[in-house]
Amino acid sequence: MLFSLSRMTPQILYVDRAQVGSSPLTVIISGVFILLILLVSFYFLGKDKKLYQIMIDESMAGVYAITNGKLAFANKRVAEIFGYTAEEMNGLEIAQLFLPSDQMKVVNNIQKLTSKNASIIHDEYQCVRKDGSIITVEINGVVTKYNGEPAIMGTANDVTLKKNITSVINFYDPITKLPNQKLFNHLVTEHIENTNEPMSLVFIQLNRIADIQGSYGFEIGDKLVNHVIEHVQGLIKNNDLVTRYGETKLIVFLFNAGKSDGRRFAENVLALFKKPYHFENYYVMETVNIGISTYPELMTIEKLSEYAHIALHASLEDGPNQIRIFDDSLHQKMLEQASIESDLSHAFENNELIIYYQPKLDLLTGKISGLEALLRWNHPIKGIISPGVFIPIAEKNGLIIPLTNWVFRTISKCLEEMPEDISIAMNISPLHFLQPDFIKNVESLVELTGVDPKRMEIEITENHAINYEMAIKKLERLKELGFKISLDDFGSGYSSLGQVNRLPLDKLKIDQSFLRHQFSDPANRTVISSVIAMGHSLKYTVVAEGVETVDQLIFLQKHACDEVQGFLISRPLPADELLAKWDDIEKVGNY
Ligand code: C2E
Ligand code: CA
Ligand code: CA
């Protein structure tokens, strides 16, 4: 019943609470008031039967009296509430009027009254009408006498409609006027249970809401979301459903829509954001990502939501304004990630982690100037797993911190076997660097291992630089301790050399993509030489990553790049193999 009401959405949406009914407190007070009048009537009018009868019979409130578990009296209103005639009600066992699940409540309340533990009881019960329908009735009762017999008397009030309307209101978001998650899930479930037609659940994430709130305030952020909702509602069919999910997401349920309909809808949503998004007097650069799951392949709203969420995350990996539909390949990936995640927690104990070291060559001397520590995981079944696979998982589940601590300790030991002028660089994940106790963590590792920080480099990526004030403070402390700082993957992110210049860095590592993409076309090579020149103008040591060919090496030498790293010089190797090949590796610098 509730949900057939909820389908009539808009009219009920705007019902004013004041119209819906009074607050529980006023209901209790008015109930008690009626009861008082009733008792006073008995007292004063007890002898004037006729007047008393008329007053009680015509009362808008239901009035009843119970003796010996049976109705001794019920006025017209009570009979109306329960669907009987007043005559039929007379002598009715009261147990017949309550749902079995509520009968204990009735018994307990009567006991409280008769044992004088309460002078009045006010409660709500699920009751059964003559036609079998279930209603909610609010009942007051006091102990008194009726026709000389001990009795319970009171008033009864049908609150079924009020309860339903209140519930409907509780099922809608007061700001957006959309069904809330609870109702949305219920309606989707109801639909799934009753049909086999295809359906799509679409998660839409508005990526820049936090930035927009930061620049224009929360109110504007909210208005933007509401504006987008209106737009999205213009793209769906009448009975499709939209709900807001948290601050930044919308969920849309498309009835009778398979994968291709879902994609078409998602493309229409993307099209809204091709140009700066305009609402009121604002133009904002918003981007969206969309994940879709489909029924009947998936069975429950929980699964549909989980898979649409996974698809959304996969689309985020592809960059802004992308759509992903949950399919077998994503399912496989999800299972794979879950198995990696569970195995990774045992990798430590089982000694499955190893560090490979990749040398960097100093182009001026032709000698190895330092090494970069690169993690590998030797999985007992899957073999060597690359850090590109397990580092993001470790970042998600927090294992990255013990993992990095382990890398630090292992590097410290390895340095003892390396020539004294050699330093080792370690990669620090942005998530770890952002931890408030990151510096404390490094300080205690230095103390624990006794390593000389001058023989270590910390590689951070441009992501770290988002909060410059915080990043600068942390990096300055690391430098005070003696660490050298490199900015990894330079050029792959957003920051310009101008911004980077604010950070206390020693080295700039030019991202591999520069050599991969710009080197093949001689016209673009100036991009690489310009970055080297700019890095030098800021007094940084410049390192080129991903050097794979002799041509690239010669070009970098010619443009005074300081250090090179890449497969041409050496692949990352276990420490002992690297030491064995050391002299051969340095021969590469003889070009
Ligand atoms: P990265 O720090 O940019 O490391 C360089 C990556 O490029 C390494 O991949 C290396 O093997 C690869 N590489 C080196 N020279 C060449 C080349 O000439 N050509 C090509 N195609 N690739 C080359 P790897 O070892 O798979 O590591 C991937 C990423 O995983 C690293 O990128 C780093 O961001 C992360 N990583 C590795 N070890 C750790 C670690 O201990 N902690 C953290 N937080 N991240 C790590
Ligand atoms: Ca690195
Ligand atoms: Ca890199």
Image (cartoon, grey):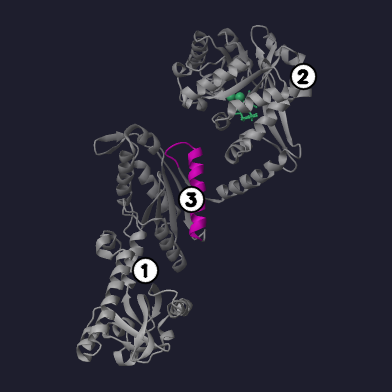
- Of the four image quadrants, the one with ligand 3 is top right
Instruction: Identify whether 574 is placed above or below 69.
Output: above
Q: Is residue 108 left or right of residue 478?
A: left
Q: Earlier in the sequence, mark 3 or mark 2?
A: 3
**Secondary element type, mark 2:** loop
Q: At x 24% / y 64%, what residue is drawn?
A: 19
* Residue type beneath disc 3: Ala
Give me the disc on residue 416: 2
Could you say where residue 205 lies in the image, as x and y percent from the top left?
42, 43
Residue 102 visible in this rendered orientation of the protein? yes
Looking at the rendered structure, the number of numbered marks drawn on it comes to 3
- Residue under circle 3? 308
Give the residues in magenta. 300-322
545 relative to 560, above or below = below
Helix, strand or loop for disc 3: helix
| Residue 2: numbered disc | 1
Disc 3 to disc 1, C-alpha distance: 28 Å
Marks 1/2: CA–CA distance = 73 Å
Q: Which residue occupies 32% across, 34% down?
A: 216
- Tell me where residue 346 sits by quadrant: top right
Are the residues at dot 3 and dot 1 in contact (C-beta closer than 8 Å)? no
Crowd rating for badge 1 (residues with CA inside 10 Å; few <14, some 14–19, many 20+): few
* Observer-nearest of 315 and 328: 315
The chief SS type of the magenta part is helix
User: What distance separates the C-alpha of mark 3 from that of mark 2?
Assistant: 50 Å
Residue drawn at the location 70% of the way across and 10% of the way down: 367
Q: Earlier in the sequence, mark 1 or mark 2?
A: 1
Instruction: Give the amino acid at mark 2.
Output: Glu
